[in-house]
Amino acid sequence: MLSPESLKKIDQEIAKYPADQKQSASMSALRIAQQEKGWLANETIEFVAKYLGMPPVAVYEVASFYNMYDLAPVGARKITVCTNLPCALSGGVHAAEYIKKKLGIDFNETTADGKFTLKEGECMGACGDAPVLLVNNHQMCSWMTEEKIDQLLADLQK
Amino acid sequence: MLEIEIDGKQLQVSDGSTVMEAAATVGAYVPHFCYHKKLSIAANCRMCLVQVEKAPKPLPACATPVTNGMKVWTHSEQAVKAQKGVMEFLLINHPLDCPVCDQGGECQLQDLSVGYGGAQSRYEEEKRVVGNKNLGPLVSTDMTRCINCTRCVRFTTEIAGLMELGQAFRGEHAEIMPFVEKTVDSELSGNIIDLCPVGALTSKPFRFAARAWEMSRRKSISPHDSLGSNLIVQVKHDVVKRVLPLENEAVNECWLSDKDRFSYEGLNGEDRLKRPMVKQGGAWIETDWQTAMDYVVRGLKGIRADHGPESIGALGSPHSTLEELFLLQSVVRGLGSGNVDFRLRQSDFSADGRMKGAPWLGMSVSEIAGLDRLLIVGSFFRKDHPLVAQRVRQAVKKGLKVSAINPAFDDWQFALQNQLCVSPSEMSAALAKVLKALVEQGSAALSPEFQALVDSVQVDEQALAIARSLGSGRRVAVWMGNYAVQHQDGVALHALASEIARLSGGRFGVLGEAANSVGGYLAGAVPFGAVSGKNASEMLSTPLKAYVLLGIEPEFDLRDAVAARKAFGAAEMVVMLSAFKFEEALGYADVMLPVSPFTETGGAFVNCEGRTQSFHPVVKNTGDSRPAWKVLRVLGEALGLGNFDYESVDAVRAQILGASGSVDPFRLSNDIDIEPLNPAGVSQGLQRVADIPIHFADPLVRRSAPLQATKDSEAPFARISPATLKTLGLNAGDKVVVRSVSGSATVVVSEDEGVAAGCVRLAAAHSSTWALGSLNGEVSVERI
Ligand code: SF4
Ligand code: FES
Ligand code: FES
């Protein structure tokens, strides 16, 4: 189901906790699994659950709770715009609207070419940098004015 | 102890109590939804907010530990304001569909909204809608009504032992669900219906059948497993509509197994027997009681005259009441025969006449919580004793270490310290090894009867581990499961297990196969004592001329259906007293007398701990059916046997138990005079391991359509371990013919790591497997 490399990484995470508390590694394990598979299918979640000796629904609770886990396939680039209150007050919603218009998709949709998925995010702890967005969960972009969004999308198109 | 003042009342509570618990002891009601005394604290509904002195904000009573000198107000202005505020939030997303909701009239949200809800909602926005889930044939969902208290989630995790429900997503989108597309398959699943404080989880079989206030609530006792759960049977227009638990902390606590809860669905099916029937010239005709009884009396008298009283025998179901079994044996003994038995699936009767009393659990059910070591021998424990297993599960969390010796294991949903899986023919050797290890640990001297057997074995790692575990305990128990009782060497296993208990300073007990497994002995429905005779197995192997069968469906309830059909087919007369018209039995029976199921009769069951629990009828007789105790009483009189003039069922009980109405403890004993034991031969062939699946165990539960639709009622597979599959050259999914000395069955193979090597686990009590005859012995498996 998962590659030996991913399993090795998961094992490293499991090793950080006492042997009877493998479930502590569930978030890391899901992250590693998503990195390999692109998104978390039910089978992937079930596999992770089995690997950690947890009931599948317990892992599903985790996977569905956090925004950064994708329970459905996403495009090559996933853009997550923060629309929580501080960001909303400083142009976050506008930034999201602008991206929607440019890509021709709504939240939770993927462009026809499979390149972009747009998601609504929760506070990223960078309210002072509003509007903020994340690319593929790892790349944080601050002060996203329309110009900077144009620039970003152009870079990502390449 | 801590001092606390609640609503002006002073009281003392033990350390670690919560404000909620303290309030309950002074009768101060704190409104709540998520709190439940048997579940962990979640504190997520916030309905229980109370005012606490010096606390800046109201605090949740369920999650606030009492501190010394604390002052609490549960109904002060601040408290009520907070409670009303919470109620307003809870109602924001709750639909106003009480008129079409099954929970209406027994809904905690409805009740509390009368006390704390506003007359008008200030919320005008859109309400959330949550999709329903398919949880299986027993629990119906209306998830939009869910208030996310997570009681159901905590129940599956903590009480049933496997988290089958979870709360997925977050905040406004949070939803209670099973893992995608899965159903809730626990044998205790129905309890989430009771736990759900709103109408999100309701009973599927009961859906829209009646309103809570239209039904009367009548007490009864479950006729299924050996615990004897206390029931509230809800009745409307003389029909049983629903069964709920009657809380009894000493027996079922506040729970019921699904079998106890939903078996009532089998009461009034198509094949319910409503009129006496006799076979004349090969054709069945319905008749009246007089004619049918005359027929039976003439038949029995004639057979006694022609062939002697020993040619008559009776078999009674262990799910029959104490009084029924007593009168059944009175009739048989009155006729001069000792052929009577209720131990229908047992095969080893060599202890008969050497038992000191009725085998029982050897302790009370509530003492389970205090055990620290337990050995279970030969049991499909979780499915055979769902609520006893639940108690063990809770005890395991508090440090109980459980070991088990079995030919096949399922997941019991609690951790087993030692799990010894051996084939049926190796079971006595396995116990002997544990015994030898105990002797070597040097606790007490071995009784000489065991010496030869113990000398013949070598202690191994696993036996040593079990002996060490038992030896290190202070409150130890060793229990025989149903499988061990039914085993071909059942008496040897009994003796060995009880010696293990003795050497480890523990108590020995028998879990008990059915609601009245203890009571059957007390009623004298066994072929020893006053007049002895043939046991259940001999009555089939050496056929009799007449059989009286009480509450038995021969193909499924007897140890060897093939032998039974042969014996009954050859008999001159087979009289069945039954609540159902057994399809298969129409061929060989001669008379069918309609007798009442537990809901239409009174009587008592003696449960595994020796507790007598009596009950009254909850509905009127169906058709012409009559309580079996009355039928047997009349039969006794009509046969001119005398001493049958009981005026009531209570009078019959007094005859059995004495005026106290409870079991004299001296009549309960697991001691037997043992004879020296010798090593059993180890079987070389493939051995059958037959379990009796939870919903196949008795005629009533087999007729409950919703229970028959559960996962537990799947048609049996031939379950074989991966290694044995390989040696047999078989694969999971193969269709095979399983052959025994008596017949064959066509089934599908499945791989099961829990089954001992060299064994096929194949369930009994099912139409697809009865043709195999005996529950154990060697079988062959061949792919087709
Ligand atoms: S379904 Fe019922 S018991 Fe479960 S969380 Fe919702 S309201 Fe609570
Ligand atoms: S609200 Fe957007 S980063 Fe905090
Ligand atoms: S009952 Fe206390 S928070 Fe729910």
Image (cartoon, helix red, strand yellow):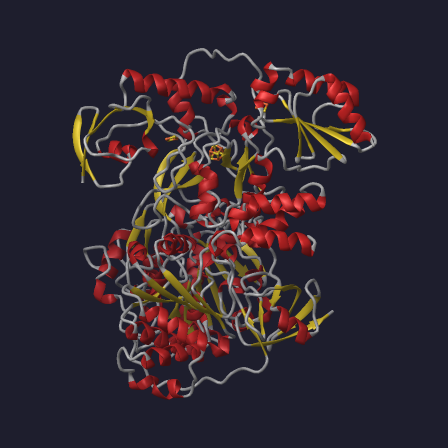
Q: State the image coordinates of residue B658 (x, y, percent, origin top left).
A: 20, 59
Q: State the image coordinates of residue B233 (x, y, percent, origin top left).
A: 39, 41
Q: Nearer the viewer, residue B191 or B58?
A: B58
Residue drawn 29% across the image and 50% down it: B250
Q: Is residue B523 left or right of residue B736?
A: left
For the image, the number of numbered tags is 0
Q: Nearer the viewer, residue B177 or B670?
A: B177
Residue B713 visible in image: yes
Residue B537, quarter of the rendered image: bottom left
Q: Nearer the viewer, residue B237 or B426?
A: B426
Residue drawn 51% across the image and 31% down it: B200
Residue closest to the far left = B10
> In the rendered view, would you say B44 is above or below B312?
above
> In the rendered view, would you say B652 is above or below B330?
above
Residue B621, quarter of the rendered image: top left
Q: Quadrant of the N terminus of chain B?
A: top left
Q: Is residue B423 left or right of residue B771?
A: left
Q: Is residue B199 left or right of residue A92?
A: left
Q: State the image coordinates of residue B342 (x, y, percent, origin top left).
A: 40, 66
Residue B287 visible in image: no
